[in-house]
Image (tube, rainbow, N blue to C red):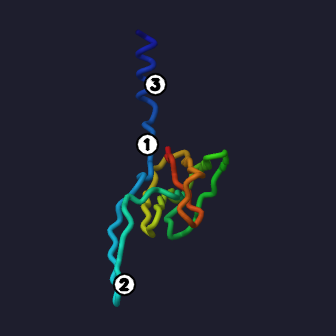
Amino acid sequence: MRLTTTTFLLALALPAQAEVLCPDSIEVNQHATVTGDWTVSYTEPPLRLTGVTIYDGPPSQNHKVKPFSVKSTRGELRVSWRLPESKRNFHLTCNYERTTASLTALLPPGMNGCNAVFDRRVSYGNEALAVKRMVCN
């Protein structure tokens, strides 16, 4: 009983660790206006996640966090970022195929790092690889 109570109290004392994930895909509404004999067509959504960028401060200041580790295997590229203490807040930007739309989120304080696994067998041009998994915690 004493061990169970101690374990329970230790679990309560540990801070809850949040996770931040880029959505796997997004929907983007586009509208093109053309003149003459042109017709407009659109590709089918969803637009899949193809890139992850971590910023130290707002993305507009362009202070990109360099990866701590990049490991390449036959079919995957594994990228890890460490998030040390900073006076600025860290931001996560998620990029998607076939669109200039991107998503940016402010990472909560206390995040230690981010990890992404890219599929080297699936690319979308401009050297953008499909993201298999990614998480910041």
Distance CA(mark 3)–CA(mark 1): 18 Å
Q: Is residue 42 visible?
A: yes
Residue indicated by mark 3: 10
Q: Amino acid at mark 2?
A: Trp
In this rendered view, identify the residue nearer to me: 43 or 17. Answer: 43
Crowding near the residue tagged with mark 2, few <14, some 14–19, many ≥20 C-alpha atoms within 10 Å: few
Q: Is residue 16 above or below residue 85?
A: above
In this rendered view, identify the residue nearer to me: 35 or 19. Answer: 35
Of labels 2 and 1, earlier in sequence is: 1
Of labels 3 and 2, earlier in sequence is: 3
> Residue placed at 62% from the left, 49% from the top?
77
Which percent across, then down, holds residue 112? 55, 45
Residue indicated by mark 1: 18
Distance CA(mark 3)–CA(mark 2): 67 Å
Which quadrant of the view contains residue 9? top left
In this rendered view, identify the residue nearer to me: 124 or 136. Answer: 124
Distance CA(mark 2)–CA(mark 1): 49 Å
Q: Are marks 2 and 1 in contact (CB under 8 Å)?
A: no
Residue situated furthest top in the rendering: 1
Which percent across, then down, holds residue 92? 49, 57
Along the horizontal axis of the image, is 102 left or right of 78? left
Residue situated furthest front in the rendering: 37
Q: Secondary structure at mark 2?
A: loop
Mark in front: 3 vs 1: 1
Crowding near the residue tagged with mark 3, few <14, some 14–19, many ≥20 C-alpha atoms within 10 Å: few
Q: Secondary structure at mark 1?
A: loop
Q: Is residue 17 above or below residue 49?
A: above
Mark in front: 3 vs 2: 2
Q: Amino acid at mark 1?
A: Ala
Q: Is residue 105 above or below residue 30?
A: above
Residue indicated by mark 2: 38
